[in-house]
Amino acid sequence: MSNTLSDPEYVLRGVTGMVFGRSYHLLAPTTIGRSPECDIHLDSSGISRVHARLRPLDYGIEVEDLKSTNGSFLNGQRIGVGIARVGDEIAFDQLRFRIMEVRQPRQATNAALHGKQARPGRRWPWVALVLGIAALAVYAARWSAN
């Protein structure tokens, strides 16, 4: 059993129109277009059959317009090829998306592997209680000995 939890590095989050609230994980080069063969199929008249290609990189997402009729936009500027970073906005015709980052893979704790929530900082009240009881026992023993 692997102890590594992995998530995609980037997510394309729809912020307008028919894509509002939808999330698309970008794990590999991804085509966007009206064609059902595209990785992200957007059935909208303003989207070309094969509109754009997105390539996740270590430092952002390469956005390449594939000679679409209505263009691809990065933060409001029409582009042929551009690099989008976390927080940037990509638009295809009237459909806009925001680039989001997903946490990097992390080592799993035993609690996470078994479906339990870790509660950091919850142990100290018990330690204080045990020490208080022990101090009272010592005080009571000394007081009764006198």
Image (tube, rainbow, N blue to C red):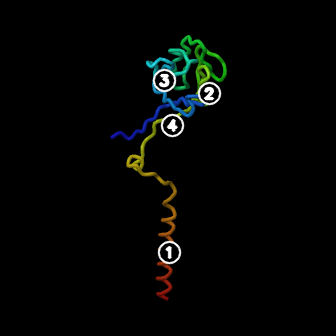
From this viewpoint, which residue is outermost toward the right?
A: 76
Provide the secondary structure element on which disc 4 rests: loop
Q: Which mark is residue 40?
A: 3
**For marks 3 and 4 on the same chain, the one whose residue lies earlier in the sequence:** 3
In the picture of the structure, the residue carrying the numbered disc 1 is 135
Task: Give the residue type that dot 3 points to.
Answer: Ile
Q: Tell me where residue 51 appears, x and y as whole percent.
A: 53, 16
Q: CA distance from mark 3 to mark 1?
A: 66 Å
C-alpha span from label 1 to label 4:
46 Å
Q: Which callout, 1 or 2, points to the residue nearer the camera?
A: 2
- Identify the residue shown where x is 49% and y is 89%: 146
Could you tell me if the residues under marks 1 and 2 are in contact, i.e. CB atoms within 8 Å? no
> Circle 3 — which element?
strand
Q: Secondary structure at mark 1?
A: helix
Comes first in the chain, label 1 or label 4: 4
Viewer-proximal residue among 79 and 3: 79
The percent position of residue 100, horizontal first and vertical second, equals 56, 32
| Mark pair 3, 2: CA separation | 19 Å
Pointer 3 or 1: first along the chain: 3
- Residue 75, relative to residue 125: is it above or below? above
Q: Nearer the viewer, mark 1 or mark 4?
A: 4
Is 110 situated left or right of 78 in this image?
A: left
Label 2 near label 3: C-beta < 8 Å?
no
- Please give the residue where the numbered disc 2 appears in the rendered image: 88
Q: Callout 1 environment at 10 Å: few (<14), some (14 to 19), or many (20+)?
A: few
What's under tag 1, amino acid-wise? Ala
Q: Position of residue 118 (x, y in %)?
A: 46, 52
Question: At which x and y percent is residue 30?
Answer: 48, 21
In the structure shown, which secondary structural element does the residue marked by tag 2 occupy?
loop
Q: Are marks 3 and 4 in contact (CB under 8 Å)?
A: no
Q: Quadrant of the N terminus?
A: top left
